[in-house]
Image: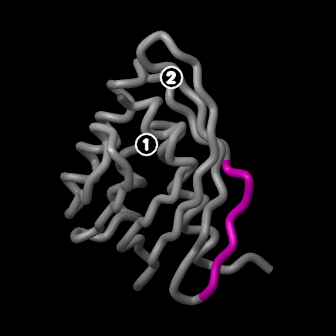
């Protein structure tokens, strides 16, 4: 049996891939926080649903809408879910693929925090 928090995270990944912001709006808590590490222009802490949607919009704009996520696996418990991801996209004339780990905090059926752990050199290089 799949943990309910795994379902929530998989639904969010599917909504991102489909560009379904209404589903994401339902899944993201009002005060969601994304923590994106590194030295690229994308790095930072994004607080609140509007800031997170702004970040996701920049991801798609900067990649010419080529940025794609492939879910390798999701594991979950009552408070967290971990997504093992493969990314691909084009930016600055470069095609890039790299992996990332997402650690999500889930509370009350909504996503409240994301800590991203990408293959840092590839992530920073892609977004510079």
Q: Which residue is drawn at 58% across and 74% down?
A: 81
Indicate which disc residue 117 carries: none
| In the image: residue 86, left or right of residue 90 | right
Secondary structure at badge 1 equals loop
- Magenta segment, which residues? 71-77
**Residue 75 among those drawn in magenta:** yes
Q: Which residue is drawn at 51% across and 86% down?
A: 79
Number of residues whose C-alpha sits closer than 10 Å to that of mark 2, classed few (under 14), some (14–19) or many (20 or more): some
Q: In which quarter of the image is residue 26?
A: bottom left
Return the residue nearer the eye: 89 or 107.
Answer: 89
Residue 83 in percent (x, y) is at 62, 62
Secondary structure at badge 2 equals loop
Dominant secondary structure of the magenta stretch? strand
- Count of picture labels: 2
The answer for how far apart the CA atoms under marks 1 and 2 are is: 16 Å
| In the image: residue 13, left or right of residue 28 | right
The residue labelled by disc 2 is: 66
Q: How is the image coloured?
A: one colour
The residue labelled by disc 1 is: 20
Relative height, residue 72 to residue 76 (above, below): above
Return the residue nearer the eye: 113 or 126.
Answer: 126
Number of residues whose C-alpha sits closer than 10 Å to that of mark 1, classed few (under 14), some (14–19) or many (20 or more): few
Which image quarter is the N terminus in? bottom right
Q: Residue at x 24, y 57 (%)?
A: 46
Q: Name the N-terminal-most of marks 1 and 2.
A: 1
């Amino acid at each position: 049996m799949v943990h309910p928090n795994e379902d929530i995270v998989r639904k969010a990944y599917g909504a991102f891939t489909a560009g379904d912001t209404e589903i994401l709006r339902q899944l993201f808590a009002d005060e969601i926080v994304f923590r994106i590490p590194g030295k690229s222009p994308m790095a930072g802490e994004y607080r609140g649903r509007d800031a997170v949607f702004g970040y996701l919009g920049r991801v798609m704009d900067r990649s010419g809408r080529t940025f794609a996520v492939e879910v390798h696996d999701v594991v979950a418990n009552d408070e967290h879910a971990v997504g093992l991801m493969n990314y691909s996209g084009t930016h600055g004339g470069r095609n890039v693929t790299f992996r990332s780990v997402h650690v999500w905090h889930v509370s009350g059926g909504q996503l409240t925090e994301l800590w991203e752990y990408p293959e840092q050199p590839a992530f920073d290089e892609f977004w510079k």
